Amino acid sequence: MNDRTVLHVKGRILVGPEDVRDELWVVDGRISYDRPVAARDIRTVSGWALPGLVDAHCHVGLGAHGPVDQDVAEKQALADREAGTLLIRDAGSPSDTRWVDDREDLPKIIRAGRHIARTRRYIRNYAWEIEPEDLVAYVAQEARRGDGWVKLVGDWIDREVGDLAPSWPRDAVEAAIAEAHRLGARVTAHCFAENSLTDLVESGIDCVEHATGLTEDLIPLFVSRGVAIVPTLVNIATFPKLADGGESKFPRWSAHMRRLHERRYDTVRNAYDAGIPVYVGTDAGGTLPHGLVAAEVAELVTAGIPPLEALSATTWGARKWLGRPGLEEGAAADLVVYEQDPRTDVRVLANPLRVVLNGRVVQ
């Protein structure tokens, strides 16, 4: 497909959950709903078309031991692309992935800078590890480096306590989130436990990653403040293995992780039922492989979220939340085509028929 080829996508174009059209055209990499005049070199793709999928918690450039080389990061991004993920919110990475922006064949990335964690309270080589008095300065630094997001590590195991514990005192969190908002950035935080959530939400945080500690008494607070969650259920599935590994040294932490895992579906369903926005994120990178977006959507359905809403959490709704267009007139042609209707069975997402990125059929 050369630069002059016009792409004709026909079948069912899912512009929105209820906005279904018969065809679209891609001219010069952009979407049009008007047939181009005098188009000659036309390639046709047929099927059910969705906006490029969104993975709202994904770490390009991160491996099990920290930052990875560019060739490894490229393979990570390609694995996501092959799964239909064409927009990534990179929720913390120690690697500089700005080079991806120059690649027309790789997913678009919205960066949150590097994780910000408490000293010796997170995975080694992942985060800036600092003390509370430096939190505002580091948040400001990452707000300027990122693409409108900052990522905090809200809790982690405290070895003296032997269990999960909040990373930051309330006053430090309030000042840091206020500074991020002053600079035009939203703030999200890694949180597994229950006792880190109140301070973060009342301090103005915009999103919580994992949110396994979201209990029924905390739900009204999230609703009233409009705080979204990204459950990363494909990652929470690893909790029993993690608990087994820490049993002998941290039995209290291990038991806690098992409880969080056991109630994970109830946690997500209760959040959704109460009106908390829920979005798809896989936590790929680190120890999880890339390309798990379809599995995460299926997990949301297993948790009790209606299939159409789970689909929106990786398409229309997720793009609106992140401020990026979908299948709109004039938007960059980033879309995925399937053989069957993904609204009726989200498992269809696991088998893209065609992936179109910046107007080019890349697979």
Image (cartoon, rainbow, N blue to C red):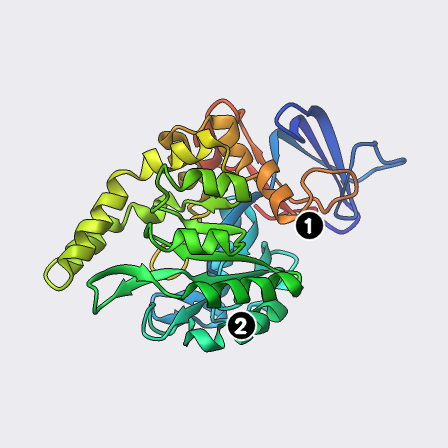
Instruction: Report the side of 104 relative to 329 (left or right).
Output: left
Residue 245 found in image quarter: bottom left
Q: Residue at x 47, y 66 (%)?
A: 171
Using the image, tell me which numbered label, if any, was put on residue 136: 2
Relative height, residue 25 to residue 101 (above, below): above
| Whether residue 298 can be seen here | no
Please provide percent x and percent y for residue 341: 54, 24
Relative height, residue 7 to residue 122 (above, below): above
Relative height, residue 201 to residue 151 (above, below): above
Q: Seen from this angle, which residue lies furthest front?
A: 171
User: Which residue is label 1 attached to?
Assistant: 358
How many angstroms separate mark 2 from mark 1 (CA)? 37 Å
The foreground one among 237 and 246 is: 246
Please provide percent x and percent y for residue 327: 69, 37
Mark 2, Cα crowd under 10 Å, few <14 / some 14-19 / many 20+, is some
Amino acid type, label 2:
Val
